[in-house]
Image (cartoon, rainbow, N blue to C red):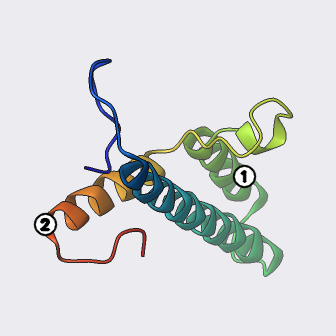
Amino acid sequence: MAQAPNDVDTFLSPEDMKLWLTIEERSIELAAERRMREASSFVNDYADGLLNQEEANRRLRAHEEKWGLGAKDEVLGWQLRDEASASIYTSRIKKQARGDGTPGL
């Protein structure tokens, strides 16, 4: 069990907590990598003249809507508001539970 329990009467063992943390760290790393790839893509396309100003601004707004502005907020820091991280985390938990992958990798 590496998934956070849904009820207050269930507790994780120290091993479960370590596994959860490993998965959490990797999920955040993967989400950050994806976030940077997406941002780099439209910024480079705009810089290379492949996007006009309107399209570049539309993609910037879409990016900020998807990922949020959490990384710019001193209080929120690296907290990401994104579907990607949740999806990756859920996928990794299910994969680990089925035994067809190394946790967190």
Residue 37, by quadrant, is bottom right
The percent position of residue 25, horizontal first and vertical second, equals: 56, 59
Please tell me which residue is depicted at 25% across the width and 49% down the height of the picture. 1
Q: Which mark is residue 98?
A: 2
Which residue ends up furthest to the top in the rendered image?
Answer: 8
Q: Of circles 1 and 2, which is in front?
A: 2
Left or right of 100 on screen, residue 27: right
Residue 24 lies, with reference to residue 76, above or below; the image says below
- Tag 2: amino acid: Arg
Q: Specify the farthest residue to the right.
A: 74
Q: CA distance from mark 1 to mark 2?
A: 46 Å
- Amino acid identity at mark 1: Glu
Residue 42's image quarter?
bottom right
Residue at screen point 18% across, 61% down: 97
- Residue 39 picture location, percent across and down: 68, 64
102 vs 49, left or right, is left
Query: Is 24 left or right of 41, judged from the image as shown?
Result: left
Q: Secondary structure at mark 1?
A: helix
Examine the rendered structure and indicate whether residue 37 appears above or below residue 76.
below
What residue appears at the point 28 percent right and 26 percent down from the top-left corner?
A: 6
- Can you tell which mark lies on residue 54? 1
Q: Position of residue 57 (x, y in %)?
A: 73, 50
